[in-house]
Amino acid sequence: MKAICLLTMTLLIAACASTPSALTSAADSTHADLSGYRSYRWIDKPLESSVLGRDRVVADIDTKLHSKGWLESEDADVSLVAKVDTREKKSTKTFYSQGSSRGWGLRPFSSGRVDSVMPPTTTVHIDTIGILTIEVLDAKTHQPVWRGTSEVKIPESPGKLKPAIDAGIEKLLSRFPTVSNGSG
């Protein structure tokens, strides 16, 4: 009975534990026609204390929007609101060892006795996830016209932070529309 309970617990832990991905994103949650818009302005930028860095995030978003043909202007067609949050993601890994036994630890003709089974070792790893949300509002009606969210695993190494942020913003704004160059 103990073996069945232990096996069930092991399977449940294995099902719950997952390898954290470096980047996941879900963008473009509202589908709107942005063809009539050409310019933007910031009305709410991320807080200065965010782990992703306000200036870095705003500069990266500005660069990406400019590459898509959008212009920053005080008399803009749309207003941008950006928010950065963080959360912790816990994952566990359990290692099972048979110690110094041979093979699977069962000896034939020994009534199923297990040789030198070591207790499992479980480690808990906590990742910090940065969540960037951008909402685009019509400047005249203040109604939302587009919203995107991106999650970035914050790397432990400061040197890897900028590439992680860049990849998150790239994925977030990949579905953001490009301004057509034709005159209208």
Image (spheres, helix red, strand yellow):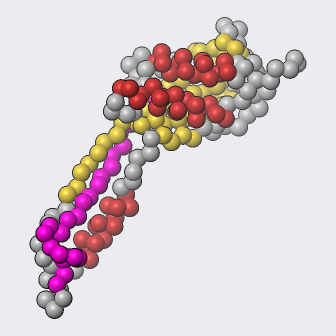
The residue that appears at 70% across and 23% down in the rendered structure is 68
| Left/right of residue 22 with respect to residue 90 in the rendered view | right
Q: List the single residue furthest toward the right.
A: 184
Q: How many marks?
A: 0
Q: Is residue 9 left or right of residue 16?
A: left
Residue at the (71%, 8%) spot, across then down: 75
Quarter of the image containing the N terminus?
bottom left
176 relative position to 10: left or right = right
- Tell me which corner region of the image, top left, top right, bottom left or bottom right, holds residue 79: top right
Coordinates of residue 109 in the picture (x, y in percent):
16, 92
Could you say which quadrant of the image residue 157 lies in? top left
Q: Residue at 68% x, 26% y: name it.
A: 143
Q: Position of residue 125 (x, y in %)?
A: 29, 45
**Picture layout, residue 174 above or below residue 77:** below
Q: Position of residue 76 (x, y in %)?
A: 70, 13
Visible residue check, residue 107 = yes
Image quadrant in which you'd find residue 112: bottom left
Residue 91 within the segment the image draws in magenta: yes
Quadrant in which the C terminus is drawn: top right
Q: Which residues are magenta?
A: 85-107
Q: Residue at x 20, y 58 (%)?
A: 121
Q: Residue furthest front?
A: 102
